[in-house]
Image: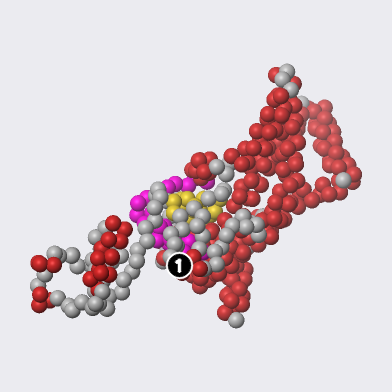
Amino acid sequence: MSGVEHPQELPAGARDPAQREPEAPGAAEESDQSRKRRGVSIPAQRPGEAHVELQSVDGPPGRFDDPALDQQAESRTRMRRGVHATTATELLLSLPSFVFSLAVMIVAGQLVATITGAAVWAYVIVAGWLASGLLALWRPVENVVAVVVMRLRRPTLRENEVLESAWTAVTQAAGSRGSYRLWVEESETVNGSATTGHTIAVTRWALKLPPRQLEAILAHELGHHLAGHTWTGFLGYWYALPGWLAWKAAWFLLWLVLATLSHMGWLGSLLALAVVAGVVCAGLTAVTQFPPVLLLFALPFLQAFVMRRGELYADRVAARLGYGQPMLEVLYQFLEEGEDVARREARWRERLLASHPPVATRIRALERYLSQLES
């Protein structure tokens, strides 16, 4: 598969003596050792021929562990998982949503306990919900989330070969022994994503990129994992889900009440106005009595800002692994495809809630970082 054809090894008596090349002392012993390596028959290295040691990658298709076991890779400073500043900030910003969801689950538990007459259900529901976040980081559950929620698929054999080559190069550069599962997203855009604890995905179109550019995308996604962005983002989403559903349900009930009252003549219209006035008064009272409530409306924008900073950090990780220039090539390709043009045409709220910075911003930040590395 390397593209280099080795001559078929012939028995010593079957070779033409006139075509034999003189062997240096000890060459026969080295040849025997090379034949015994890994229990397979390997042709002896010929004089002047560079020998390339191929490393095997074991594991099921789409899952690769770091094969960098040689002395050079072991002496390299390894990049390990940690908690970046953006990760810690995102955790702090997720606390209000978590507290609101906890209150919702406590109310739900009390309601179930009242209906069933068993007070233990109140504790079981809350404890089960708290433990469910850790369960979501279990490998089998991660796979279900990747397929059902993220709409990802396993790579084909051909895609697996491309990903194997690129991912091996990235893990060797990072010196990371962590194992991840690689997926493919059915999309015609060039992109990658890192979700949950050990999931990395690239789009089907990204597999057509030159090898170094594909490696740069994978290195960028590995940077998200090493910084802790993936598990904090997923847990923040998971534990905010009950509160989000309760909020949506409250707005739906309010809309249903107002729609019903508006069809009941002038009396119903008066009642609808009274309901709206009551909601407004309750909101103003909450703000005046506890002004930090206003921060709840700013949380989505603050979280999006932190996520954009995390993208810049992942770009720097790719540059530290030696993929700065290929990453710039990918970003310039995004720029030529008009991503920033579409961003400028979007509404202000969509721009503020975007999880990625403008491509031009990423390019300038990465170029500054590369110039600092060169100086």
Examine the rendered structure and indicate whether residue 8 appears above or below residue 258.
Answer: below
- Judge whether residue 16 can be spotted in this image: yes
Left or right for 251, reference 41:
right
Q: Which residues are magenta?
A: 149-174
Which amino acid, by three-letter code, is at mark 1?
Gln
Number of labels in the image equals: 1
Side of 346 relative to 335 (left or right): right
Q: Is residue 140 left or right of residue 94?
A: left
Determine the image quadrant of residue 20.
Answer: bottom left
Q: Nearer the viewer, residue 155 or 180?
A: 180
Q: Secondary structure at mark 1?
A: helix
Q: Nearer the viewer, residue 48 or 225?
A: 48
Residue at figure coordinates x 33%, y 69% from the top left:
52
Q: Name the residue beneath numbered marker 1.
A: 71
The reply to whether the magenta stretch includes residue 122 is: no
Q: Quadrant of residue 14?
A: bottom left
Q: Main secondary structure of the magenta part?
A: helix
In front of the other: 79 or 149: 79
Looking at the picture, how far across and down is residue 293, in whole percent?
82, 47
Rendered-image quadrant of the N terminus? bottom left
Quadrant where the image shows the C terminus: bottom right
Residue displayed at 51% across by 64% down:
174
At 61% from the left and 41% from the top, the residue drawn is: 134
Where does the image place residue 186, in percent across and percent down from the top left?
45, 50
Q: Crowding at label 1, few (<14), some or many (≥20) Cα neighbours within 10 Å?
A: few
Residue at 53%, 40% in the rendered image? 141
Residue 135 locus on image (x, y percent):
59, 39
Q: Position of residue 254 (x, y in %)?
A: 75, 34
Q: Is residue 145 visible?
A: no
- 290 versus 51 height, above or below: above
Say if the magenta span includes residue 152: yes
